Amino acid sequence: MNPSTALPHVVIVGGGIAGLAAAFFLRDEPVRVTVLEGSPRLGGKLSVSEVAGVPVDEGAEALLVTRPEGTGLIAEVGLAGDRVAPGTTSSAIWTLGALRPLPRRQFMGVPSDLAELAQSGVVSGAGAARASQDLELPPTTRDGDVPVAAFVGARFGVEVVDRLVDPLLGGVYAGRSSDLSFDATMPTLAAASRRYRSLAEAAGSLLPPPSSPVAVPVAAGEQGRAPAGTRSGGSVFTTLSGGLGQLPAVLAKASGAEVRTAAMTRALAPGAPGAPGAPAAGPGWRLTVGSAAAEELIDADAVILAVPARPAARLLAGVPGASAAVTAFDEISYASMAIVTLAYPRSAFPGASSGPFSGSGLAALGWSGYLVPAVDGRAVKAVTFSSVKWPHLAEATAPGAEPLEIVRCSVGRIGEEALLQRADEELAALAAAELAAATGVRGGPVAHRITRWGGALPQYTIGHLDRVARIRAAVATQRGLAVCGAAYEGVGIPACVATARAAASQVTEFLRGGRQ
Ligand SMILES: Cc1cc2nc3c(=O)[nH]c(=O)nc-3n(C[C@H](O)[C@H](O)[C@H](O)COP(=O)(O)OP(=O)(O)OC[C@H]3O[C@@H](n4cnc5c(N)ncnc54)[C@H](O)[C@@H]3O)c2cc1C
């Protein structure tokens, strides 16, 4: 315990959404909390800045509302009134030479209505015929964890994998279905697939009835995050009018914690615990913070590591008894990516003079964006028509000026790091050229912004659940230590917040329980 105060000291390493949420969940506990963020900026993968004068998210931009943790946190910090609903969340797949509707009746790309799949044109006639064999094939047995592509491919064939499931997974993890674990990335479907012979039927069992007016959680954020939504309305996602990137600063303030930026934690070591079975006589942990030239030592009674796997492994490397966690953390790879945000005058888009979406600009296309299968060889893997998905962005254009269309292009799947090495102007030109090919937009953007996210998303590859179990078991043996964030049970914000709440409870229990 810090002698300068009567309260135990909890140090949280990492000022992303998970670390800040953990600090917030400790706000009413009898503890003193310090958050140490290594970079000069709070928020991690949440960040907002202006493009052509409009505040647009650079990282996470949509929150799934079908899990309560994210929206609950927003309400608790007093931002519920700033929530906005999407204008539309229907999505397309850009493949086989056209924008084609993402089937409504699918679960993370796994189709449940094979007639709708055939009609969508997302797969060829032969691909649709192969997919329908799912209804006839004998059960596909599996022994332990398997890649998504192997299981889904065995049921529906390669086209469904390549043109539906892989792009949807790519939108969430920037990963490939040939590597990602079926059990870890689609746990509810993996469980349902053990109850049904047909995977289409298993997927259907997880969707609302076809006649339901309720929006279908198509890419259902098993991980609390979904890259594509529904045609029927905006109930699946939400964002904040000033961008999700405004949440970290509000959370930091509401937590009442001491929140420090540019405070890189370089080492973690056990401090001076009390005798076994007795309350600790001194701090349980010592953290080394800052550069070697200006090193600072901070003592803590409990520590929450809210950092990605690599820094977590580095910090635990010097902790006796934590080697199993270090090994498992080292096995978690990360995909890097970039977000290229482009702004165009509305009249640059061809519009439509008739049909259900007649009108001007991007809205006339009738989608909130599109996904691009890797097999089609494009650089951009997903595009969000931000000003269509979030109409308040279109309304934010300066009064009297022509409305702007804001387009968010996501570049970089795992293994495509070379693409991300290209200069900003080159990436912007590449994204703009592909957008023109897909939508017919004329002329170049009036503004652009490139945001590079190195080590953006953990890859839940085969064995992920086992790795997380090993990490959690090893961390549980360390007195007053907890972990949270995207590396564990979901990369989406609600899942990260859930791990933060659990970590806050773990250290509270430890401190209350005489630190046994
Ligand atoms: C481009 C992009 C778009 C996304 N879109 C969505 C979306 O729309 N919806 C959604 O739900 N999810 C989305 N996600 C996923 C989600 O945003 C992330 O999984 C989540 O924000 C991760 O939060 P975190 O706190 O676990 O980690 P991070 O945000 O990575 O935060 C960890 C923090 O720890 C700091 N740190 C690291 N090492 C140290 C150290 N040694 N000392 C001190 N500090 C350290 C880092 O600087 C960082 O700030 C997106 C992710 C990306 C990359």
Image (cartoon, helix red, strand yellow):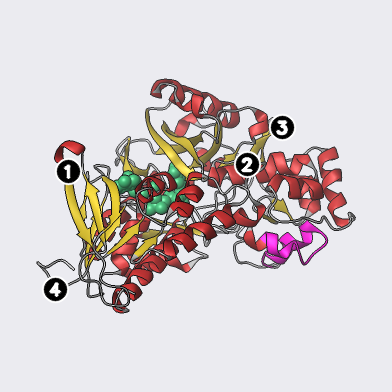
Instruction: Tell me the kind of residue under disc 3.
Output: Leu
Say few, some or many: other residues with alpha carbon within 10 Å of mark 4 (under 14 / 14 to 19 / 20 or more). Answer: few
CA distance for labels 4 and 3 = 66 Å
Residue 496: quadrant of the picture: bottom left
Label 2 vs 4, first from the N-terminus = 4
Instruction: Tell me the kind of residue under disc 2.
Output: Pro
Choose mark 3 or mark 1, whichever is in front. Answer: 1
Say few, some or many: other residues with alpha carbon within 10 Å of mark 1 (under 14 / 14 to 19 / 20 or more). Answer: few
- Give the residues drawn in magenta, as a range: 189-208
Q: Residue drawn 66% across and 30% down?
A: 376
* Near-viewer residue (169 or 184): 184
- Mark 3 — residue? 96
Q: Which image quarter is the N terminus in?
A: bottom left
Q: Residue drawn 37% across and 72% down?
A: 505
Residue 192 within the magenta-colored segment of the rendering = yes
Please indicate whether residue 203 sits to the left or right of residue 129 in the image: left
Label 4 vs 1, first from the N-terminus = 4
Q: Taking 506 as reference, is 468 above or below it?
A: above
- Mark 1 — residue? 295
Label 4 vs 3, first from the N-terminus = 4
Residue 157 within the magenta-colored segment of the rendering = no
- Mark 2 — residue? 167
Label 2 vs 3, first from the N-terminus = 3
Q: Residue drawn 23% across and 48% down?
A: 288
Is the residue at mark 3 in contact range of ligand 1, meaning its CB lies under 8 Å from it?
no
- Mark 4 — residue? 6
Q: Taking 177 as reference, is 270 above or below it?
A: below
